[in-house]
Image (cartoon, rainbow, N blue to C red):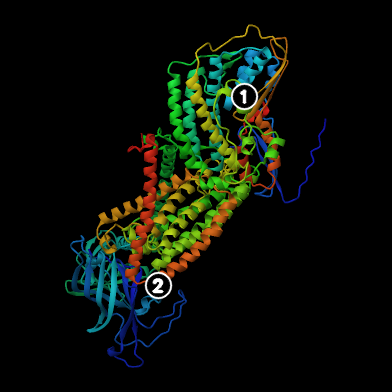
Amino acid sequence: MNRALCLSPLLSLLWLAACDAPGSEGTAIIDYRPDKLQVGDRLVIEGPQVVTSAATAVARLSFRPPPAFRAKTRTTVIFDGTFTYPGRTRKQGPRQEQKRIELAGVALPAQTDPVWSERVTVAMTDETRRLVGYAMFHGRLGVEQEGAVHWIPARLQFFPPSMRSLADLVASWTSDRQVLSWLGIETAVENDALVIGKVIEGKLAAKSGLQLGDRLTQVGGVPLSSNRMLTTAVRRLPAKGVLALQVARGGREFTARIAGQSRPWVIPISLVYLAVMLVFAVVALTVALLFAGVLTWVERRVAGRVQSRIGPNRVGPQGILQWLADGIKLMLKEDVVPDAVDKPLFKLAPYLVFMGLLGTFVVLPFGQFLIVADLNIGLLYLIAITGFVSLGLMMAGWSSNNKWSLLGGMRAAAQIISYEIPSGLALMVPVVLAGTLSTHSIVEQQGGLPWQWYMFDNPFAFVCFFIYFVSALAEGNRTPFDLPEAENELVAGYQTEYSGWRFAVFMMSEWANIFVIGAVATTVYMGGWQVPGLSVAQQAQSAWWQLLGLMIFLGKSLGLVFVIIWIRWTLPRFRVDQMMRLCWRYFVPWTFVSIIAVALWSMIAPPWLRLLGALGTTALCGGGLGLVFLSRVAFNWRNNPEKRWTWNPFY
Amino acid sequence: MNQLIFSYDSGNEMVLNMGPHHPSTHGVLRFIIRTDGEIMREATPVVGYLHRAIEKIAEGTPYESLMPYVDRVDYVSAMTADQCWAMAVEKLLGHEVPERAEYLRVIASELNRISSHAICVGVMAMDIGAITPFPYLLRERETINDLLEELCGNRLTYNYLRVGGVSHDLPAGWVDRCQTFLDHFDNVLPEFDRLITNNEIFIDRSADVCPVTAEEAVAYGLVGPNLRASGVDFDLRRDLPYSIYGGLEFDVAVGTGTMGSVGDCWDRFWVRCEEMKQSVRMLRQCLADLPQGPVYNKPKRIRPTGEAWVRVESSRGDMFCYVVGNGTPQPERVHFRTGSYNAMQIVKLKSRGVMVADLVAFIASLDVIAPEIDR
């Protein structure tokens, strides 16, 4: 059941020709990139002569091809070295194997694809399924052609498949299935050829005389070592072209010509890709909306308990369906668009805010492999897409044609834009510590234990955590920064004229934002999904660790969400000028100083000193915080005997 | 009579209407605000939205039947309003009230003062954004409402006092329940102080906001906690005692500008919190000294002539009632003068150069109750 699983070129080895000398001793591998591989990747060995293609319009230099690297030649990629697999448990420790894995492929001639050069395409097939898990390879990478082997020392990492490679897999598998069903055969890969395992009556293959057990060896001169080759060949047929398959049957070789009246409409791979991504996007959207809805219930119950009352407890067990009832009610309300508003802006504004919020769910790392898109500019994308929120709020305030809404919108604009600076800068501190903007990598570089979090890395980072937290609260219009929607002053600020579903969209955005604040703070400052005591490699091994990581991430995020709700119902709100003063005179200078200090610290301090600093910060800052909290609890315990806690928050 | 309202528009102002329908105003009030977006040029109050012609109705209602209407003059602190009217008619008649009735009146008034101040400080905190202190105080107010409901059957507009006494005597066990409540309430106020009175954000929002000097307060006729917060040491219960207040021992809280200036919003807030503590003190004394005896000395015929006036210290300050009798069962003229009416006038003075958010805090700190303004 070997499947050709390639769509995106991942590993390319560059050949370099020596100046003039023909002969294999002049060729050498100069580079391989990248150093992370997944199942489904295609290994591409690029020859030095690259044809300029109109499609890509990138001109590269061309060298005289060395005669040793020839098209249509069987080529083998060899991994020869030590594979280190992380142990299943801590006691077991990592496991090392010395082995040699050979992947066979064939160089495709340049004519079949003007975009490619002489390339060897080697598929990471099922034979390498052992590499599906996490493994580190240290050894040498070799390319063999006609007996001559060329080596390069290499360190590679093998990863389990990500969401994108899954999309690639699905896309390529779908197109392969399409072609096979057009031909009417089922195939299996065996020894560099496709063996027909089944012929369906009435279809093209049966009509052309192909039989069970035939071996399809070549098409157009290219050996068929996977279904992918067949699909590519079929795709490249002209309109009324004839597919010429080399067939071997019982020792005899002949050419079968298959002339189809109509080529199969193979779903363009990009569409399949898009469909898979759409499914992931819908999943992310559902998750976001579920969180937004359930968090309203959590907020109302917690608010009730803080105010010594109960909160909604009628609709559904413990009132857990209250948000659903409220959402449905809002949906069914009359769609009121006041007469004098600026209609396009009025209708668009809530959705801009919503879009700005939902876009952030794409880069949140819920688990080690549970991230929708591991953008390598993840945090930058996050900060950028939340810019839509301020745009939407201003539009809402302006278009409502209402002075109170205008005041609310202007306040919101000033507040959000001001606080984006300390928020963004405070997010840069973990970026400095991690060296990457990708959320996945930032979490990977932390650990599960508190002193491995960036929050406790040094006192500057500790303070920047709180600066980020407070700035994100301000951006989300949460008390104590809820001036733009201050009920007592402005009715509802920019939301005054909105009712029904549009109002619900604003509300949902606010609650989704709360979760995003907690999630982002967890990701960059509190170690994300990392399980305490395990390394990243160990966590990749088992699905149970993945589940635990997800629970840890959600637990930390929801803990911060609880703190946000707690703060809302305890503190009064700031006035506009006090809020601005806080931002510009305290937060912005402090974050600037912090970035410089943290950068210096991470440059100068050796690892042992950094560990010591982290331990010290955990003890002092973290311990201090815990002590203050516990001492307040003890004080209230002593002085308010009526208010001891209850184990059942739902009574 | 035509009136020309002259106002100039400097071109970069907008005129906002903090309308009768507004979640923040304490009752049905309206402010016309001229502002440049955040700083106000002026806020002109427009009153009269809650005018129910109580004084006119009084001209056709017998003296003893007017009590429910008087409740609604100040429905948050109805016992003190009742006391004002009852004392006015008794002074007009020259009628005696039994001593137990006087004690019961004071007990009811002080309980009502606690619940009225609870609403005021809770709503002020809520207007500034801290929503939680209000339910905390409402929880205490629920106990007070229960106590007063046991006493007279009503939770808000009590109709408890009568001309000549009170309507009902204490039910069995009421004194103990009240004592339990007072012991419990002793813990509530310190917690409240920790939660909101000494909260830094709250202090930032209320200290140095619209300070009213003593001269301004006296000139504009502010009364009650508003006057005392501005530094004027005057309390009717101590300086012109009526009923049994002369025999009670209590302190009068006067604002000293602890957190900012004398007479700022924080002082007004603090004065009301202190008054709640003093009310608890007075209640303990009253409950301890409660004499036995009748509670209602019903007058034979109420057909007085002449005029009388009386001042009581209601929760909002000096409430004054003037009644003129003409020998018929209905009064000739009744007039109430309440503290909230004067407080509205100072809003126009103090609102210049202040932000809209501060206006909300200021109005909340003045403890303005709309029915009291318009009657």
Residue A361: image location, x then y, percent? 42, 55
Q: Residue furthest top?
A: B300
Foreground disc of the pair 1, 2: 1
In which quarter of the view is residue B307 placed? top right
The amino acid type, in three-letter code, at marker 1 is Pro
Q: Is residue B367 left or right of residue B6?
A: left
Residue B183: image location, x then y, percent? 43, 29
Q: Give me the chain letter of mark 2.
A: A
Screen quadrant of the C terminus of chain A:
top left
Classify A523 as above or below B250.
below
Q: Is residue B350 left or right of residue A286?
A: right
Q: Is residue B126 visible?
A: yes
Q: Nearer the viewer, residue A250 or B201?
A: B201
Q: Is residue B21 visible?
A: no
Residues beneath discs 1 and 2 located on the same chain: no
Which residue is at 66% across, 12% downward? B94
Could you say which disc has been placed on residue A603 in the image?
A: 2
Disc 1 vs disc 2: Cβ atoms closer than 8 Å?
A: no
Could you say which disc has been placed on residue A387 in the image?
A: none
Element assignment for label 2 = helix
The amino acid type, in three-letter code, at marker 2 is Met
Compute the Cα span from label 1 to label 2: 77 Å
Screen quadrant of the N terminus of chain A:
bottom left
Q: Which residue is mark 1?
A: B241
- How many residues crowd mark 2 within 10 Å: few (<14), some (14–19), many (20+)? few
